[in-house]
């Protein structure tokens, strides 16, 4: 069994005593070579990647144990969180493109400058805008570009129009993780860590720079979300990192963790701040649906509007929230985080999350839940 000491020693070697920032995926690839016998090799992972989730041996769980040890250490864990808050390696080139055109199309997301706002439209139309491996990188780059764009003052997140027959032609905020792809083994364990240490935390904390602590200096803006239809699972989690949420009066929120058998990102850490511990436990452990226009929904959503009035409401909110200036907005966000969720609190949570999610991801109960509640065995990719 991999010990904390061995994991931390490997982290020091891989990062040259924390003088170099390494993203989670590169870190685990390097650790597999450094910790042979404790971590699956690249060849072993590649051989297992094409299997259905139920047929995998769970080799990736060792990555969870390794990352759990790293994140549990105050120095190494903070350094890894910092690494994941830096711009994605591909973002610099895409930002230059966006600055020229004001529009950027990516896999899973589209960014467009609209007046004072950089508007990200989440796009996975066939799968109700669900998140999966095809959307992850594009969404993170979109978040980077929206934050780093010098010509916009606020960021907006909205779901695009879907083509799924049940909701064809409608805008939906999103259906969470793509459960069909999860069942089919197309979503790797590291997807969870890349997502929650990456673009979701960047929405919450901004984009960091190499030479300054993310607690002290980051490039950040106010975030506005437009919730239409529903925000299920991971999309509900995103709302907990948003500054101002406008929801349609017929929209709803769910965190169906019990039916899925996984941990809903940082929702266990953040949702109680919005709705209290009891409702948070009901939502995560007992499948409570929260209608946006309900009393509980209004604790998460700032404004409820008729679905047909969403464009008008967004324009009004953008105008109102862009008046204070980026510097003031960033300072106030940092002040809120100092009391609510400093980086060290997030680091400690993610240490537990990394370890426990690895167990959930390969649990037989997850397979059974997907077959029972999602009819996953009979769905096409």
Image: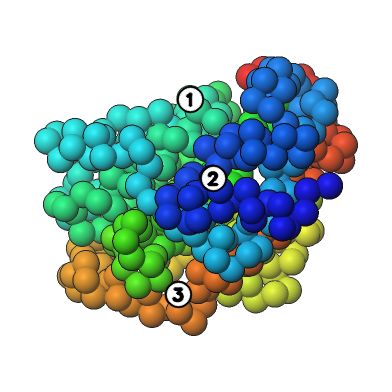
Q: How is the image coloured?
A: rainbow
- Distance Cα–Cα, label 2 vs label 1: 44 Å
Q: Is residue 373 left or right of residue 316?
A: right
In front here: 36 or 288? 36
Question: What is the secondary structure assignment of the residue under circle 1?
Answer: loop
- Distance Cα–Cα, label 2 vs label 3: 30 Å
Pick whichever of labels 1 and 3 is earlier in the sequence.
1
Q: Quadrant of the C terminus?
A: top right
Residue 326, image quadrant: bottom left
Identify the disc placed on residue 14. 2
Provide the residue designation for mark 1. Answer: 163
> In the figure, 312 relative to 44: above or below?
below
Residue 32 rendering spot, x and y as whole percentages: 66, 35
- Distance Cα–Cα, label 1 vs label 3: 38 Å
Q: Which mark lies nearer to you, 1 or 3?
A: 3
Residue 39 rendering spot, x and y as whole percentages: 72, 37
Which residue lies at the image location 21% right of the left edge and 49% below the top edge? 149
In front here: 7 or 359? 7
User: Is there CB contact under 8 Å for labels 2 and 3?
Assistant: no
Which residue lies at the image location 70% right of the left edge and 74% below the top edge? 277
Question: What is the secondary structure assignment of the residue under circle 3?
Answer: helix
> In the figure, 194 relative to 36: above or below?
below
Q: Within 10 Å of the Cα at label 3, are there few (<14), some (14-19), or many (20+) other Cα atoms?
A: some
Pick whichever of labels 2 and 3 is earlier in the sequence.
2
Which residue lies at the image location 76% right of the left edge and 39% below the top edge? 38
> In the figure, 227 relative to 372: above or below?
below
Identify the disc placed on residue 44. none
Q: Within 10 Å of the Cα at label 1, are there few (<14), some (14-19), or many (20+) other Cα atoms?
A: some
Which residue lies at the image location 64% right of the left edge and 38% below the top edge? 34
Provide the residue designation for mark 3. Answer: 337
Q: Is residue 271 visible?
A: no
């Amino acid at each position: 069994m991999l010990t904390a000491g061995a994991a931390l020693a490997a982290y020091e070697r891989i990062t040259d005593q924390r003088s170099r920032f390494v993203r989670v995926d590169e870190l685990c690839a390097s650790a597999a070579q450094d910790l042979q016998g404790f971590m699956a090799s690249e060849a072993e992972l590649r051989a297992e990647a094409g299997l259905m989730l139920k047929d995998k041996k769970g080799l990736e769980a060792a990555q969870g144990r390794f990352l759990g040890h790293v994140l549990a250490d105050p120095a190494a864990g903070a350094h890894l969180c910092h690494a994941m808050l830096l711009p994605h390696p591909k973002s610099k080139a895409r930002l230059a493109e966006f600055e020229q055109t004001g529009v950027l199309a990516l896999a899973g997301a589209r960014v467009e400058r609209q007046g004072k706002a950089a508007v990200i439209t989440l796009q996975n139309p066939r799968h109700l805008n669900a998140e999966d491996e095809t959307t992850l990188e594009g969404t993170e780059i979109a978040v980077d570009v929206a934050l780093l764009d010098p010509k916009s003052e606020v960021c907006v997140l909205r779901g695009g129009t879907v083509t799924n027959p049940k909701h064809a032609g409608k805008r939906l905020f999103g259906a969470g993780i793509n459960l069909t792809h999860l069942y089919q083994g197309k979503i790797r364990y590291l997807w969870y860590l890349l997502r929650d240490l990456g673009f979701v935390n960047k929405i919450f904390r901004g984009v960091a720079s190499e030479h300054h602590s993310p607690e002290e200096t980051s490039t950040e803006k106010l975030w506005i979300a437009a919730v239409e239809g529903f925000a299920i699972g991971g999309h509900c989690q995103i709302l907990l990192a948003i500054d101002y949420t406008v929801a349609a009066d017929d929209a709803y929120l769910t965190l169906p963790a019990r039916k899925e058998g996984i941990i809903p990102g940082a929702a266990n850490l953040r949702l109680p701040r919005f709705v209290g511990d009891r409702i948070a436990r009901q939502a995560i452990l007992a499948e409570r649906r929260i209608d946006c226009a309900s009393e509980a929904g209004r604790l998460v959503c700032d404004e409820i509007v008729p679905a047909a009035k969403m464009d008008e409401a967004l324009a009004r909110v953008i105008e109102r929230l862009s008046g204070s200036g980026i510097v003031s907005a960033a300072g106030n966000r940092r002040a809120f985080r100092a009391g609510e969720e400093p980086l060290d609190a997030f680091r400690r949570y993610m240490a537990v999350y990394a370890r426990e999610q690895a167990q959930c991801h390969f649990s037989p109960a997850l397979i059974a839940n997907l077959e029972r509640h999602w009819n996953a065995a009979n769905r096409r990719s």
